[in-house]
Amino acid sequence: EAHVAPLQALADRIRDSRDAPDGVPRFGPLDGGINARVLLLQEAPGPRAVGSGFVSFDNPDQTAANARHACESAGLMRADVVRWNAVPWYIGNEGGTKIRPATRDDVKRAEPWLAQLLELLPRLQVVVLMGRNAQRLEPAIKRIAPNLRIETTTHCSPLALNYSPERRPALIEKLRAIAVSLPT
């Protein structure tokens, strides 16, 4: 698809680099692609994203389902959104069954790739940093793209959302405020 082709090319370049020894899923082809106005930036792809080959709302895992539900509940249109990760490559065990937390070094190594991604999103207005590890990129985003609005929220993993019952409605409300603020 033309709207995701430049992003898929970026994912392929990352996968072919020395930074990504264990796989880089591609961008969800049904999402906004280069036309996205909102970037949901999570931590790192899990085993299901690597297995499907995509960071997608349609992946068969609870994080994807939570992200889809939160966006739909907030009225954030899928065509306005692109999902990606602070660390775009898999950082889990060799068997591909369990992700480890991203380290500061992982996030720092991923910064140049984030800069390339932001260049490919000309309509981007808001970056939503989902979770503490993604939030480590806030200074880099401010440096790379100072005119972008940056919002922070919890990660949409089941562990993050189930830890405190108030997190799910807070996530939806944050995304609703973003959806309402987008020009029509």
Image (tube, helix red, strand yellow):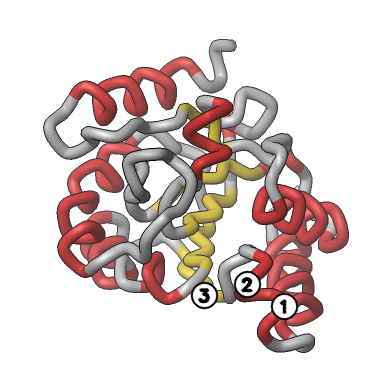
On the image, which quarter does residue 102 sit in?
bottom left
**Element at label 1:** helix
> How far is disc 2 from disc 3 in space, using C-alphas?
17 Å
Residue at 42 percent of width and 76 percent of height? 132
- Pointer 2: what residue? 159
Q: Nearer the viewer, residue 8 or 104?
A: 104
Residue at 48 percent of width and 66 percent of height? 129
> How far is disc 1 from disc 3 in space, using C-alphas?
18 Å
Q: Position of residue 59 (x, y in %)?
A: 68, 37
- Find the residue positioned furthest to the top: 1
Per the rendering, the mark at residue 152 is 3
Q: Compare marks 2 and 3 and give the one earlier in the sequence.
A: 3
Q: Compare marks 1 and 3 and give the one earlier in the sequence.
A: 3
- Pointer 1: what residue? 162
Q: Nearer the viewer, residue 56 or 150?
A: 56
Is any atom of residue 118 visible in this view? no
Q: Quick check: 60 above or below 165?
A: above
Whether residues under marks 2 and 1 lie with C-beta atoms below 8 angstroms apart, the answer is: yes
User: Would you call the spot at circle 1 few (<14 residues within 10 Å), some (14-19), or many (20 or more)?
Assistant: few
Residue at 59 percent of width and 30 percent of height? 28
**Element at label 2:** helix
- Find the residue positioned furthest to the left: 18
Q: Is residue 141 left or right of residue 46?
A: left
